[in-house]
Image (tube, rainbow, N blue to C red):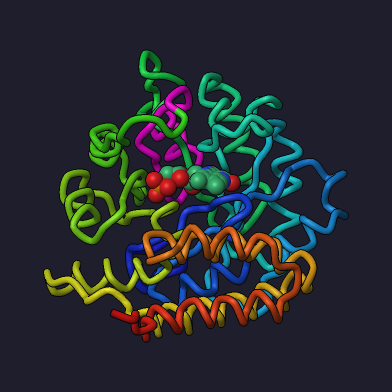
Amino acid sequence: MKIGPYKLPNNLVLAPMAGVTDRPFRQLCREQGAGLAVSEMVSSNALLWGSEKTRRRIDHAGEAEPVSVQIAGAVPAQMAGAARFNVDHGAQIIDINMGCPAKKVCNVMAGSALLQDEQLVGRILDAVVSAVDVPVTLKIRTGWDPQHRNGLAVARLAEQAGIQALAVHGRTRACAFRGEAEHDTVRAIKSAVSIPVIANGDITSPEKAARVLQHTGADAIMIGRAAQGRPWIFREIAHFLATGRRLPPPAPAEICAILTAHLANLYTFYGEYTGVRVARKHIAWYSKGQREGNAFRQHIHRLDSAEAQLASVRTYFDQLIDPPVMAA
Ligand SMILES: Cc1cc2nc3c(=O)[nH]c(=O)nc-3n(C[C@H](O)[C@H](O)[C@H](O)COP(=O)(O)O)c2cc1C
């Protein structure tokens, strides 16, 4: 699949997730087979650009190309400014967030709340596309609520505005994360526009990935929550799509190696204090479904140093590799 001049290595995309898809996680998912990893959103409010959070979000050192950065906001001129700001800091693709239902975004009428005002959508798209020389992509939900599923109209607007790829999460804004994502709207959008379409929502396994691609005819799929604590899902899906066979799940020793390398990158990227705190949720995700996972997670939440956190992770996974022999 191509986005502007960039040919992606495959059709698997890591979804932008605020608080999750920081640079270490994006790099890890790319290593594990994602063809594109969209960054967490950067606010269009210039007052926030000096913050530590934004400073980290615009740090793309060592990231695989193309670097895609998501921007969020509702004022066309501010969104144009945010696009230029990010291109100046290394973004090679600008992605516009009209898909996020989070309160903080929607209260200021951004994210998926924008879908109820198609005129404003058009003005934002025009402003951003004409502000930068790099490809601009758009991420939407299927509509405002189930009675106002205007995803198709927005997709046509996007195509007219020069948007170069469109990701569609198969829920409306009102659905939040409830119920199953539907992919019929994505299918309708794909057959109505000629820009690349990326299907998103509840893709949690290689089989589901294949079914969604087949059902929608989409050019690519985007995976969010299923990659949390499971970045290897990308190589599993890539393998399944190529061969029709499942890769065996990674053994505890490999999970431990991936996780400890991930932790080391988090400590370097955030510094020890914040790194240890950001790492807790990732460790919890990696240990989901593993033996004695609950007790391990409670223990991890009490640790404050990188050394103690790493040591506990190693001990925990070591005993998954070599379970202690119980006395009869
Ligand atoms: C913790 C979290 C943060 C998210 N942040 C964003 C965001 O910043 N921008 C955005 O467009 N979507 C955001 N989303 C939505 C995801 O990109 C994706 O559309 C959604 O999770 C559905 O895909 P999934 O079923 O594969 O998780 C977020 C989702 C989660 C779970």
Quadrant (top left, top right, bottom left, bottom right) of the C terminus: bottom left
Quadrant of the rendered structure where residue 268 is?
bottom right
Furthest-top residue in this view: 147
Q: Residue at x 77, y 73 (%)?
A: 272
Q: Position of residue 322 (x, y in %)?
A: 37, 86
Of residue 285 and residue 79, the one placed in the foreground of this image is: 285
* 305 in relation to 101, above or below: below
- Does the stretch in magenta take in 95? no
Furthest-front residue in this view: 328
Q: Which residues are magenta?
A: 154-175
Quadrant of the rendered structure where residue 223 is?
bottom left
Residue 2 seen anywhere in this rendered image of the structure: yes
Quadrant (top left, top right, bottom left, bottom right) of the N terminus: bottom left
- Left/right placement of residue 279 relative to residue 314 reads right
Q: Position of residue 219 (x, y in %)?
A: 29, 55
Of residue 179 and residue 316, the one placed in the foreground of this image is: 316
Of residue 268 and residue 131, the one placed in the foreground of this image is: 268
- Does the stretch in magenta take in 158? yes
* 216 in relation to 56, above or below: above
- Left/right placement of residue 148 relative to residue 259 reads left
Q: Residue at x 37, y 13 (%)?
A: 147
Q: Position of residue 305 (x, y in %)?
A: 75, 74
Of residue 106 and residue 260, the one placed in the foreground of this image is: 260
- Left/right placement of residue 9 relative to residue 192 reads right
Q: Position of residue 202 (x, y in %)?
A: 33, 45
